[in-house]
Amino acid sequence: MKYKLAEDARPQVTLLLTATLISVALWVVSWYMPFVGYIVYPLQLFATFVHESSHALMTLITGNTVMSLTVSPDGSGAVWSQSSGFSSLLISSAGYLGTTIFGTLLLVWMRYGFSARLALYISSGLVGVMTVVFGFVVPFFYLLANVTFGSVVFTVLSGTVLTAGLFAIAKFAPQKWVNFSLAFLSVQCLLNAFFSLKDLFFISASGSQPTDAANMATATGIPAMLWVLLWIGISVVVIITGVRMYASVKTVSGTESLFED
């Protein structure tokens, strides 16, 4: 089956490529000038919120209890929950895959011409609800079990800043900057998921640090490395599907038609 770029998708693809090139350039430059990393630091924290929110939402979907959600200054995060059995497997898998799916959904959202402002409002609301409910209220309900007061403070502070920032962009920025911000947010989520899985691969290969993959290995007896490879494979399939939906038309027997548009 042959695919090619849809004519009406060219402006969107140009926007996405611009956001991708800027993101990669900032990442490469930050190797030599670490202070440049602070430019995308808020977006790294956003991706962490999406990752941890995916764990929390899957915990609720499977009928279990979230005890806390925290984000750390180094960009890592944690969700403590009460779960067991098969549901714990779904919860552990939800973080990396959830970030990939979220970024891909933003691609599809843009491709089908839905409001970029609305997407930013939704993203702002997601971070805000997670911050208030699972970052602030729930940890104190459980008397700060497994978390520190400092981690709660940073989670609430960073969540509040991200919520306000996304809301302000959606509310006050010109449309072209709203569109670019949404594309940049999508790219950052996908890059974060990719590089986080890469880091997880090497962590799993070198030791027994507590990770989502290690939790899966403990619960199933299947090596953590296999779980990482499975998550990478699923993420690649999701991203490829999203990119095709974002930018392609499908050609069959010489007849062109828009791909799922």
Image (tube, grey):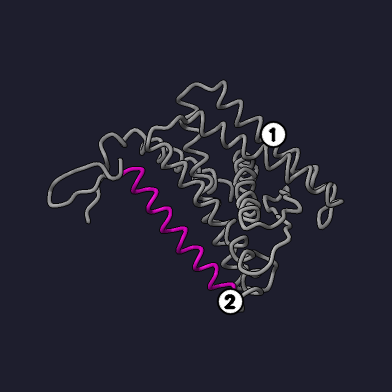
Q: Earlier in the sequence, mark 2 or mark 1?
A: 1
Q: Where 232 sits versus 9, above or below?
A: below
For the record, the magenta segment spans: 222-247
Left or right relative to 46: residue 229: left
Q: Identify the residue at horizontal 85%, vertical 47% (top origin).
A: 149
Q: Nearer the viewer, residue 63 or 139?
A: 63
Q: Secondary structure at mark 1?
A: helix
Dominant secondary structure of the magenta stretch?
A: helix
Mark 2–mark 1 distance (CA, rounded to whole Å): 39 Å
Q: Where 115 sits versus 204, above or below?
A: above
Give the farthest residue toward the left: 254
Give the farthest residue toward the bottom: 221
Q: Secondary structure at mark 2?
A: loop
Amino acid type, mark 2 = Pro
Q: Which residue is mark 2?
A: 223
Examine the structure image and report whether residue 70 is included in the region drawn in magenta: no
Q: Where 139 sits versus 261, above or below?
A: below
Q: Position of residue 184 (x, y in %)?
A: 50, 38
Q: Quadrant of residue 12?
A: top left
Amino acid type, mark 1 = Val
Q: Position of residue 127 (x, y in %)?
A: 64, 39
- Badge 1 crowding class, 10 Å Cα cut-off, few under 14, some 14 to 19, many 20 or more, is some
Work out which quarter of the rendered image holds the C terminus and state it: top left
Q: Identify the residue at horizontal 33%, vertical 43% (top origin).
A: 247
Q: Nearer the viewer, residue 48 or 256?
A: 256
Q: Are marks 2 and 1 in contact (CB under 8 Å)?
A: no
Left or right relative to 17: residue 199: right
Q: Nearer the viewer, residue 158 or 142?
A: 142
Q: Identify the residue at horizontal 79%, vertical 43% (top origin).
A: 137
Q: Position of residue 239 (x, y in %)?
A: 42, 53
Q: Which residue is mark 1?
A: 161
Work out which quarter of the rendered image holds the N terminus and state it: bottom left
